[in-house]
Image (cartoon, rainbow, N blue to C red):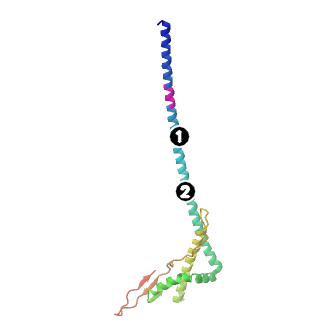
Amino acid sequence: MNDKQRDLEERRAQNAATIATAEAMRQEALATQRTAELKATQIAQATADAMKLRIAAEASADAEAVKIRALGAAQADAIRSVNDAIRDGGEAYLQLKQLEMLPLITPAIAQALAQARMVNINSGSAAEGRGAAGGATDQITGVIQTLLATQLMRSELKDMDVSGNNHSEGRVPITGTVPPTNSVVAYPAPDGNGINPPPVKRR
């Protein structure tokens, strides 16, 4: 082998080594690029998820705030409706509502009265000079006003749906116990020795 052939073989070996080195560097660059792309994708996904959660939380908070404001407005409207109706209708309006609500409150009042032999109605200063009948009338009127306000308020809340649904159909009349008014004191009958037991205060 002469010198020219030896130089040619050395150059071929050097070229092969250079090509191998370049290929290794290219593979390393590709791996680095894939790693960077994967990290960028993960970061973008995490950012998108965080933004999605934040938007959902803000939307939920806004919806709750709207619901609270709507409920407050409905309650205020119900109270104003009761006050306007009482102001416009006056005594005739209250008497009409008394007749309408008697089936609701009569059983509860009868049950309370049936538990005592003697009932003392605390009429207060508003019914002075009118006796027990006047005090009882005032108490029943107060109960009816309270029931009326509750009924109108629940009716407004059923008609109003923040999500846009209408629940006005199939409305069920409101039933339940009578709210407490002024206190009622029941005096039990005396025992066989003629001793009166202490009165029982019912609210």
The spot of residue 17 in percent (x, y) is 48, 19
Can you say whether 200 is above or below 45 in the image? below
Can you say whether 88 is above or below 31 in the image? below
The spot of residue 149 in percent (x, y) is 57, 75
Q: Which of 98 and 142 lies nearest the eye of the viewer?
A: 98
Q: Mark number for residue 60?
A: 2
Q: Is residue 92 left or right of residue 147?
A: right
How many badges with numbers are in the image?
A: 2
Q: Which of 189 and 110 lies nearest the eye of the viewer?
A: 110
Badge 1 is on which residue? 41
The spot of residue 139 in percent (x, y) is 53, 82
Reading the chain from its start, which is encountered first: label 1 or label 2? Answer: 1
Q: Residue 69 occupies which quadrant of the picture? A: bottom right
Q: Is residue 166 left or right of residue 187?
A: right
Specify the amino acid type for callout 1: Thr
Q: Main secondary structure of the magenta part?
A: helix
Q: Which of 2 and 132 lies nearest the eye of the viewer?
A: 2
